[in-house]
Image: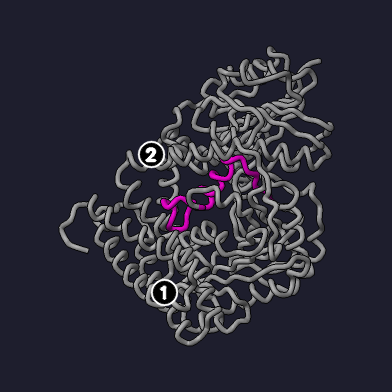
Amino acid sequence: MEQNVSREELSSRIFELFNTGEEAIEFLNQAGLQDNIYLLEDLKVLCTTLAAGIEQSGAWITLKNRLEELGLNAPLAIERICQALKEGKLENADMQYRCIFVPLFLFWKRYAEFFLIYAADEDALRRWHEEERIHQKEVREQPKEDSQQDFRYDLSIVVLFYGHKEMTEKCLEAIRKYTTSRSYELITVDNGSDEETTAWCESLPHEKKIYYSHNMGSSAAGNLIFTMAPLYMEGKYLLFVSNDVIVTPGYDEILYQCMESDPAIAAAVPVCNSASNYQTISVPYQDNNLEDMLHFAQEYNQFNPRKWTDRARLFCILGCYRPAALMQTYLAYDPLFCYDMFADDDQCCQFRRMGYRQVLCRDVFVHHYGSATIGAEQFQVMDLGRAQFYQKYNVDAWNSLGADLFEVLGCLDINPIESVRILALNPLFGESVLALCNRLKECGSDSVVVDALTEDHRYLDDMEGLFHRSGLLEDAERVLEGNYNAVIVGSGLERCLDLRAVCALGAKWLTPGGLMITKHTNYFNLAALHSTLQSGDFVNDVFSKDPCENPVLNLISDGALKAFLQNKGLELQRSISLVNHSVDPFAQLVAAALQVNSDEKAEEFLKTAGKLNLWRKRM
């Protein structure tokens, strides 16, 4: 590439080369490799020139990216294909071409389009995300149906690894030993491992061994797999396995049956011993004792669809994916999230907004060592990923989950009825609302339908992907039909912009005898007071996770809330204190120091982080 060319001219030349490369790939797909090694050599030169041009344009790219690593891997991939052809290893050359080079090249082009064109300035980036949002809406409105094509295997199991030979060996051995119910092909993806680990993997008998010399990071490599695996996988579902996971007996059948149960399921994920996001269970074995773990897993893994729970967000240490859902995305992960953090959140947002379900299978367990593929630097990039998520969606990833009631709803005693209609108010990303739906189904309800209203237009796309009907609070008369058996305020009441309007609307649309569920925070509990004293700024501390949220602080009095809702026809049926036991000893000391009439009552107040209230509408 020439020096001192304009940005527009350089970008034009780069994409001319990409287009030429695609034409060469199309020709090789038709003509084959054996008699066209000269064209592969030309492709190698083209890739080297492309990498140089993209490097030259680096001064204009302000966002973190993995374009350099992609550019380094492309010509080396062709070099290995040519070497295999010269050695007469035609099948191996064909595999490397189909599974390594072509997906890498096409993915490289998509990444380059994002960073050289759409990420060039804020307006262009907004245009990319708006086009993506419109596409997601189009997909959301389409019926979810599986194709009728035949597949060679039930599962294509893809294992991504970077070093950690001993751990990866145990992972692959468990796959071989316990994937017994479903046919599968094994695909390993070596993301720039050391020589010993790479040589060991190359000695294994399976056919599809994908190898990249230069590590691309787990998010970029995962993005490459999820975006491009449908080009070369021969299974009906993609089963992605991190190399720090040990699968267990029966896992394959349960996940497969979950995916088969509904073409609208994009991903099914098991529970494990070590993960965040409410995806773990308590286990009786110590640390990484695999023998005891397997005894536990054999008893635990019992097929039970009532334990399949819909989630708004799932982290994938192991996940079974529907290729059709992956192929509907522009890229499986937005290129913004190429440094490991919040790529999962982005993918879940895409699935959610396209109208796909994400299911946590609580009837199947796998063992997770933890963070072998990410490394210690994850904490250094967390703030960057969180900021990038906000840049794209205009909401905070954590503060928007709507998981305020998640834990307590999961074990709430509920008398189910066969068919339930729920009105969700301010559900945000919907995690608490889904928790209520899951609990109702687990307790025996066969049909649960949710309509939703919000005060905040930023969450409409997520609501429309998750629920039956959705709209803004002021559109209630147009959106809603009939009364509801249950109403749930998905966010804490203190986050409502107009608390009275939200509560009054819920009471209005609740059928007599119906249940309304609310939760509010006690900002005077000991943990909040301690945080306030440390920060010196109460309001900013409360709302710092989302600076665009209106800084309204609804300090809620139990008595005032009860009086207001009684006036709307509701009676308090039950109040559940959400107690923070970590402050027990300090609460005792503070209560004693206050010298109030009832130290016990003061202590309870100081420990109570909030309350979950169940309100029943009078008949």
Residue of label 1: 78
Q: Can you name the residue that lies furthest to the top here?
A: 567
Q: Secondary structure at mark 2?
A: helix
- Residue 173, position in %: x, y? 67, 76
- Residue 202, position in %: x, y? 55, 81
- Residue 6, position in %: x, y? 19, 52
Whether residue 237 is situated above or below residue 586 in the rendered picture: below
Q: Residues within 10 Å of mark 2 (few under 14, many from 20)?
A: few
Residue of label 2: 127
Q: Can you name the residue that lies furthest to the left here?
A: 4
Q: Is residue 220 left or right of residue 266?
A: left
- Location of the N terminus by quadrant is bottom left
Query: Any magenta on residue 374?
Result: no
Is there any visible trace of residue 594 in the rendered image? no
Q: Which amino acid, by three-letter code, is at mark 1?
A: Ile
- Location of the C terminus by quadrant is top right
What residue range appears in magenta?
332-360
Q: Nearer the viewer, mark 1 or mark 2?
A: 1
| Nearer-N-terminus badge (1/2) | 1
Instruction: Return the residue nearer the eye: 235 or 416.
Output: 235
Q: Residue at x 43, y 79 (%)?
A: 82
Is there any visible trace of residue 153 in the rendered image? yes
Q: CA distance from mark 1 to mark 2?
A: 35 Å
Q: Which amino acid, by three-letter code, is at mark 2?
A: Arg
Q: Residues within 10 Å of mark 1 (few under 14, many from 20)?
A: many
Q: Residue at x 50, y 77 (%)?
A: 93
Query: Any magenta on residue 349?
Result: yes
Q: Is residue 160 left or right of residue 181?
A: left
Instruction: Return the residue nearer the eye: 496 or 421.
Output: 421
Say which quarter of the image contains residue 517. Answer: top right
Q: Residue at x 60, y 60 (%)?
A: 317
Whether residue 392 is situated above or below residue 190 in the rendered picture: above
